[in-house]
């Protein structure tokens, strides 16, 4: 029994996954357009197994994209923290939240650990 080749949509989903892993974000636009066209008018007949395979790859890509988005957001937060520190002293309160000391405040206890 010979197995049929993977549907073109699966191959495109694999290419999208590879682009995400390589951080090749410019490639996502054209690949997404090609995938949309393929799903709109498949180049081959899709049976239930092919549809399940497409769904599994799409779910994998969605999880990868969520993780990528979370990583980008974390990096942006960290860059904002670094910029804040570069602008002046930053301390933390007892709950771990940022405190920016008021340089004009006179007296009183220290604002946090140094």
Image: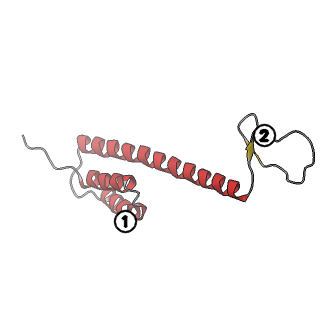
**Residue 63 occupies quadrant:** top left
Q: Residues within 10 Å of mark 2 (few under 14, many from 20)?
A: some
Disc assigned to residue 81: none
Q: Is residue 50 above or below residue 34?
A: above
Q: Quadrant of the C terminus?
A: top right
Q: Position of residue 65 (x, y in %)?
A: 44, 49
Q: Residue at x 38, y 43 (%)?
A: 59
**Residue 98 occupies quadrant:** top right
Q: Residue at x 30, y 59 (%)?
A: 38
Looking at this view, is 59 or 50 the one in front? 59
Looking at this view, is 24 or 11 the one in front? 24
Residue of label 2: 112
Q: Position of residue 44 (x, y in %)?
A: 21, 55
Disc assigned to residue 30: 1
Q: Residue furthest left?
A: 1
Q: Residue furthest right?
A: 107
Q: Is residue 112 above or below residue 87?
A: above
Circle 2 SS class: loop
Q: Are marks 2 and 1 in contact (CB under 8 Å)?
A: no
Q: Quadrant of the N terminus?
A: top left
Circle 1 SS class: helix
Looking at this view, is 90 or 98 the one in front? 90
Residue 81 is left or right of residue 47, and the answer is: right
Q: Position of residue 64 (x, y in %)?
A: 42, 46
Closer to the chain start, of discs 2 and 1, is 1
Q: Residue furthest front?
A: 114
Q: Position of residue 57 (x, y in %)?
A: 33, 45
Q: Residue at x 16, y 50 (%)?
A: 5
């Amino acid at each position: 029994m010979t197995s049929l080749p993977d549907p073109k949509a699966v191959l495109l989903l694999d290419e999208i996954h590879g682009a995400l892993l390589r951080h090749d974000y410019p490639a996502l636009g054209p690949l997404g357009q090609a995938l949309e066209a393929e799903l709109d008018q498949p180049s081959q007949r899709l049976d239930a197994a092919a549809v399940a395979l497409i769904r599994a790859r799409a779910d994998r890509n969605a999880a990868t994209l969520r993780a990528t988005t979370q990583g980008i957001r974390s990096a942006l937060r960290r860059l904002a923290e670094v910029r804040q520190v570069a602008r002046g002293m930053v301390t933390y309160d007892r709950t771990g939240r940022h405190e920016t000391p008021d340089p004009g405040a006179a007296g009183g206890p220290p604002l946090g650990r140094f």
